[in-house]
Amino acid sequence: MAIASRLQKTLLWGAVVLLFVSPAFAAGAPPANPEHGRQIYAECAGCHAMTENGMGPLHCGLVGRRAGSVPGFAYSEVMRESRIVWTPEKLGEFLKSPLSYLPGTNMGYDGLYDARDRADLIAFLQLATTDVSACGTSAPQ
Ligand code: HEC
């Protein structure tokens, strides 16, 4: 009887510990760091700017936007007709390897291979959607 109740107690505590520890495991890596993402954005800034179209379309307000929808930018046909909506997940897949994700895209960029860098960059792009002041000094178009 004593053994059984000790076992029960152990199981109970095991369950309690699991309950508290598993969300931390589920979350996996530490939260993404948008400030680091802003630095990573230097990789994109040769072609993109936050508030103006350049070689690539402007990025302010990107997250949640339909692909190929920035006015005045001459997209490739595949981008314009992709029907992608730029969720963080889709951005992650695209940025990992733009050409394999969307063959025929004009974005001449190999990819951002490091998952951590991608997560941080996307966190920055998300910030530049929810808080347009993160886009820079001029207003988004
Ligand atoms: C060599 C130039 C170049 C670099 C570097 C570059 N891009 Fe692009 N990007 C483009 C071009 C050009 C397009 C338009 C592609 C098309 O129409 O197929 C584009 C399109 C995009 C789009 C689709 C936007 C929309 O409005 O649908 C996203 C998102 C994007 N780029 C993100 C990035 C990010 C983030 C980086 C940095 C990690 C980056 N790009 C680096 C040239 C570049």
Image (cartoon, rainbow, N blue to C red):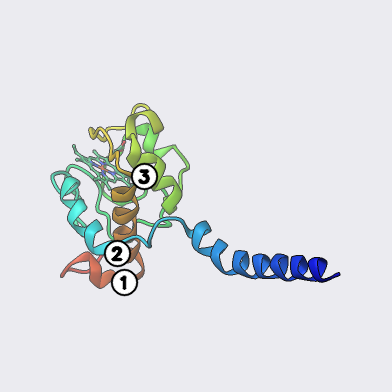
Which residue: 43% across, 57% down?
Answer: 64
Q: Is mark 2 within 8 Å of ligand 1?
A: no
Q: Give the distance between the C-alpha atoms of the residues marked 3 and 1, in whole angstroms.
A: 22 Å
Q: Quadrant of ligand 1?
A: top left
State the mark number for residue 68. 3
Instruction: Tell me the element at label 1.
Output: loop
Asked whether the residues under the numbered discs 2 and 3 touch, taking CB atoms below 8 Å apart as contact, a structural biologist would say no
> Does residue 82 appear left or right of residue 44 in this picture?
right
Residue behind mark 1: 131
Query: Residue 99 occupies which quadrant of the picture?
Result: top left
Q: Secondary structure at mark 2?
A: helix
> Could you give the CA–CA distance between mark 2 and mark 3, rounded to whole angstroms?
18 Å
Q: Residue placed farthest to the left in the image?
A: 46
Q: Nearer the viewer, residue 61 or 36?
A: 36
The kind of secondary structure element at disc 3 is loop
Q: Give the residue type at disc 1.
A: Asp
Residue at x 30% of width, y 52% of height: 71
| Residue drawn where x is 34% and y is 45% of the image | 115
At label 2, the amino acid type is Ala
Can residue 133 be seen here?
yes
**Residue 61 in the image: x percent, y percent?**
33, 61
Q: Upstream in the sequence, badge 3 or badge 1?
A: 3
For label 3, being within 8 Å of ligand 1 is answered: yes
Taking depth in this image into account, of 137 and 16 the one nearest to the observer is: 16
Q: Is residue 103 above or below residue 24?
A: above
